[in-house]
Image (cartoon, helix red, strand yellow):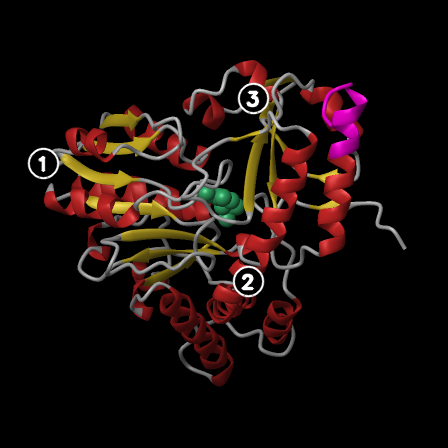
Amino acid sequence: MAIKRAYLDYQSTTPLDERVLSAMLPFLTTKFGNPHSAEHNYGWEAEAALDVAREQVSTVINGQPESVTFLSGATEANNLALKGAMERLGHDKPNLVTVATEHKCVLEAAQYCASQGYGLTVLPVQQNGLLDLNVLEDAVTGETAIVSVMAVNNEIGVIQPLKQIGAICHAKGALFHTDAAQAFGKIPLDVEAMNIDLMSISGHKVYGPKGVGALYCRPGNGAVIAPQMHGGGQENGLRAGTQAPALVAGLGKAAAICAAEMAQEEGRLRGLMARLKRELASVLPAMRVNGDEDSRWVGNLNVCFPDLDGDRLFADIRGLAVSSGAACASAVAEPSYVLDAIGVDKKDAKASFRIGIGRMTTDEEIDFAIEKISQAIRNQGVGA
Ligand SMILES: *Cc1c(COP(=O)(O)O)cnc(C)c1O
């Protein structure tokens, strides 16, 4: 039977892997203890779940388990990293450096720091979405406390040169933070080899549950972050509040599955994405890819169909869950600031959209997407 809808918006969120759900269930039922209860078995078994997850998460990035702090998601991790670093280091090093194409939560947290009197530099990117290392080199000084550059962009999928960025930060004595919500578990990451001090991770981008994430603080540098949530001293005092063992166990299991299946999954997605791209380009040869064509996560395709009416295209592809080039803020659809930052004009941004594929994406869903989009293009009297 032909399918009637397809979810191709994996950068927005991912479905929960059933194996992850199984790992979570005991902590929602019988193993309900508080991991902070040190006096009895109920507490111990919950705490043991956190330990297992810390090991699973840290293994994926070649980190130390005790340097993983569990919290509510990448938004919180990014806030903690930036505000926590500025609070602790800002007296001597009052500046923060980030990039125009970061996720809103990094940009807003950085703006908050600026409102508290710290210096903020927001760097531009090149037309391919990648940071120019010379521009970074010029911007980072001995007064820079922390530099925040995301690993894989959530809109255009480009992979930043993390290792080189980290090397520049360290040469200037600045911490390097990366928002790896879209990269963790998908591309190889190594906090040691890549000079990464702080890394933000999200559960629901890697087939885990929503409402959980982690901040990795590389040993020696973790102490420089000031907690932003005060209370019972959980997570080594870095994030107070009773941890959620079910969510954390889910994140751990999700990380372990990603690590075990990363290479194989990447290969499969590469094939699906190549077919999708080829077929769409054959319908409309003027199609352009937004963001670098090589340094990108294979599960992301952000394309522009020049001269197409984006609103009409969207109306015609109902049933196909993809994301538009216009991020809806209030009633007015403003073109994406990320596309703006790579020089895509308003008109082309409106004719752009993002397709995200992942673990559960089937051949049939790719067929469905090709059929829907091709038809929508033909409806506008263009395309082959
Ligand atoms: C999804 C996402 C976030 C926010 O993560 P949450 O866990 O939903 O708070 C931050 N940064 C990037 C790059 C993301 O893709």
The location of residue 178, given as percent across then percent down, is 33, 46
Q: Is residue 212 left or right of residue 122?
A: right
Report the residue at 35% width, 42% height from top.
160
Q: Nearer the viewer, mark 1 or mark 3?
A: 3
Q: Amino acid at mark 1?
A: Gly
Q: Amino acid at mark 3?
A: Ala
The label on residue 265 is: 2
Query: Of 126 and 32, which appears nearest the observer?
Result: 126
| Circle 1/circle 3 CB separation < 8 Å | no
Report the residue at 17% width, 34% height from top.
137
Tell me where the magenta segment starts and ends, as one range. 374-384
Q: Mark 1 or mark 2, which is nearer the start of the sequence?
A: 1
Read off the residue under disc 3. Answer: 349
Read off the residue under disc 1. Answer: 142
Magenta includes 258?
A: no
Crowd around label 1: few <14 · some 14–19 · many ≥20 (10 Å): some
Between the C-alphas of marks 2 and 1, the distance is 42 Å
Q: Is residue 345 above or below residue 354?
A: above
Q: Can you see residue 208?
A: no
SS class, disc 2: helix
